[in-house]
Image (cartoon, coloured by chain):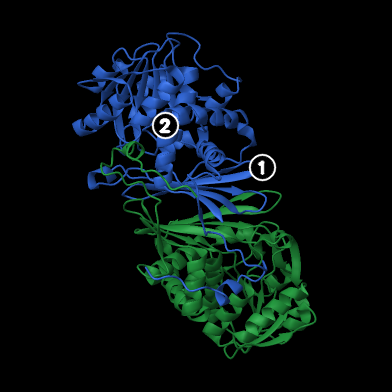
Chain colours: A blue, B green
Amino acid sequence: MVQFVDVAHMSRWMADEGVQSLIADLVTYLEDDYRRWEQFDKCPRLPSHSEHGVIELMPTADAELYGFKYVNGHPINPSRGLQTVTAFGALADVATGYPLLLAEMSLLTALRTAAVSAMAARRLARPGSRVHALVGTGTQSEFQALGMRAVLGLDDLRIWDVDPAAMDKFTRNAQALGFTVHRATSAADAVRGADVVTTCTADKVNATILTDDMVEPGMHLNAIGGDSPGKTELDPAILRRADTFVEFHPQTLVEGEIQNLGAAHPTVDLWRVVDGQAAGRVSDHQITVFDSVGFAVNDFSALRFLRDRVSGSPYATEIDLVAEPADPKDLFSLVTLASPVAPH
Amino acid sequence: MVQFVDVAHMSRWMADEGVQSLIADLVTYLEDDYRRWEQFDKCPRLPSHSEHGVIELMPTADAELYGFKYVNGHPINPSRGLQTVTAFGALADVATGYPLLLAEMSLLTALRTAAVSAMAARRLARPGSRVHALVGTGTQSEFQALGMRAVLGLDDLRIWDVDPAAMDKFTRNAQALGFTVHRATSAADAVRGADVVTTCTADKVNATILTDDMVEPGMHLNAIGGDSPGKTELDPAILRRADTFVEFHPQTLVEGEIQNLGAAHPTVDLWRVVDGQAAGRVSDHQITVFDSVGFAVNDFSALRFLRDRVSGSPYATEIDLVAEPADPKDLFSLVTLASPVAPH
């Protein structure tokens, strides 16, 4: 039997443990895995693009565990009542090839994306940061706010979204979580004076959510919405005067903000910063950009964290996903010995 | 909710419908998909190799459906009571990115592998074939026997395996299915006089299950066990005097029998034969080899077939795999509104 965490159980786990607390703990798992980055079997995720969006597989492995995530990105989905991103994934035993854990990952991806942003901001945001601007208040936004509060204590939020209903929704959720929320009148208004700016919009276009004039010295930009070819958020001029940090350059070059600048644009591997091999922020006037696209190791850490936390608990159920005949060479016996199934 | 077919339900479905009948029907689905081969988004499967075996992801898509399979190959597994191959996979809606069906695929892979072999043999075996030799009587063997009976009516079997217990198991299963089983004393003895020879062994070595002298003019070789770098079954001399048919050359060149001969060795795409663009068998003396490694389109066809057959039936259940908040931008509401979960 394979352990299974469905949406209802994942929701309840997050409700009982607290999202901010889980993000803080997941950051520790991510830091452990980023420090041993070179031990992972890594490749850019495998996309299948269509006119509607993209479906991707994101595998990685170390010597003991293999993990992968199925994830889609369909920016048009909310207009028809659907999620932009849905995901599920599994963790497997490298020694046997058997899956160990299957999990919904729509919620888990929101948690891990916030935790990766938090891990980066801990090293890239200016010391003494107080104000977090969020441009885009959709699915990821509450998780991002909690992530920045988990590592930097930011509870002063300035928000902007082109959809007023999304701002209403965010304000309601964030106030219940104890945040102070200032509803801005534009992206420029939201960003003005902020220490950390998160862009989490979803259009599949080369958009300019932030123009160069909005970005002030010392800001840290947490750019998470640009994550696919032809889907970016920042004026390239911003990147030219900033220091840019990436998860896995071969993938970010295709999917991230730097797709607009090319391979020659210098970047710093985030794992080297976490491991102490490279500098994060070095001055109060430096502009830092975390050009986050989402990499398979992030999901691996999240699945590993989930497994450690829910194994054997009421938050995990079991699923009959692996054929286990008594004689391993007699798979056919499962057919000859099959029991009746109950009608619906 | 996503439809789900677990091992128990898959077993029962195969028991109720009959494996041979399902293979015959799946051949039709495969032929439909092979005839529209050029419509698929195709790439070699994505392997993660370790000292223990391999774990692979196999995605493909047409304009409407996306499918992928997770599959491992661990030849050492039966010695510790485990399956060499376990698999599961999903079918998703390209337009929304939402998964539609999740299924166990250990049993389904055995069914589809037999159906692909049957589809190939229908075009490559000599007319009037009567005798099927099976070298390797493990997990795949009963399915392969039923596949050849489904399309060619072969019920006269000659078998060989280095493991006598595996031959006992096969004989028991095959006699119950109405086959005549001759238990040979060696691979050469099994193959002698056969019309169709299936090799389905599992060692991860460049083995020589068939030597050149065993192969007689007119034979069709259905070589399914060689499917990974360093894992082959045939003396390369056999391939040099045969015509070789492949599923997807870029993948077969890395994983199949032809890895021992290189890119210059001529092959014929099976889809072109199915579509009538290329010849299958052209003479009674020709030796034909189906160098089968297993390609993503095969699994796509199997998932599509499964979905058409089990949707809304007692063979499919539902699984809570996709987060569906009332407001698509309010994923966080699933946490705030989460219901308690029942303890074990």
Residue B206: image location, x then y, percent: 74, 62
Task: Give the image quarter of residue A126.
Answer: top left
Callout 1: residue from which chain? A
Query: Can you identify the residue that label 1 sits on?
Result: A63
Q: Is residue A142 above or below residue A220?
A: below
* Element class at badge 1: loop
Q: Earlier in the sequence, mark 2 or mark 1?
A: 2
Q: Position of residue B253 (x, y in %)?
A: 61, 59
Q: Amino acid at mark 1?
A: Ala
Q: Is residue A46 visible?
A: yes
Most foreground residue, B334 or B43: B334
> For numbered disc 2, what is the local secondary structure?
helix
Tell me: residue B334, above or below residue A260.
below
| Camera-side residue of A90 and B64 | A90
Instruction: Name the residue carrying label 2.
Output: A19
Q: Is residue A25 above or below residue B211?
A: above
The residue shown at (56%, 60%) is: A322
The answer to which quarter of the image holds residue B118 is bottom right
Residue at the (76%, 78%) spot, across then down: B187
Q: Mark 2 belongs to which subunit?
A: A
Residue A79 located left or right of residue A284: left
Q: Is residue B115 left or right of residue B164?
A: left
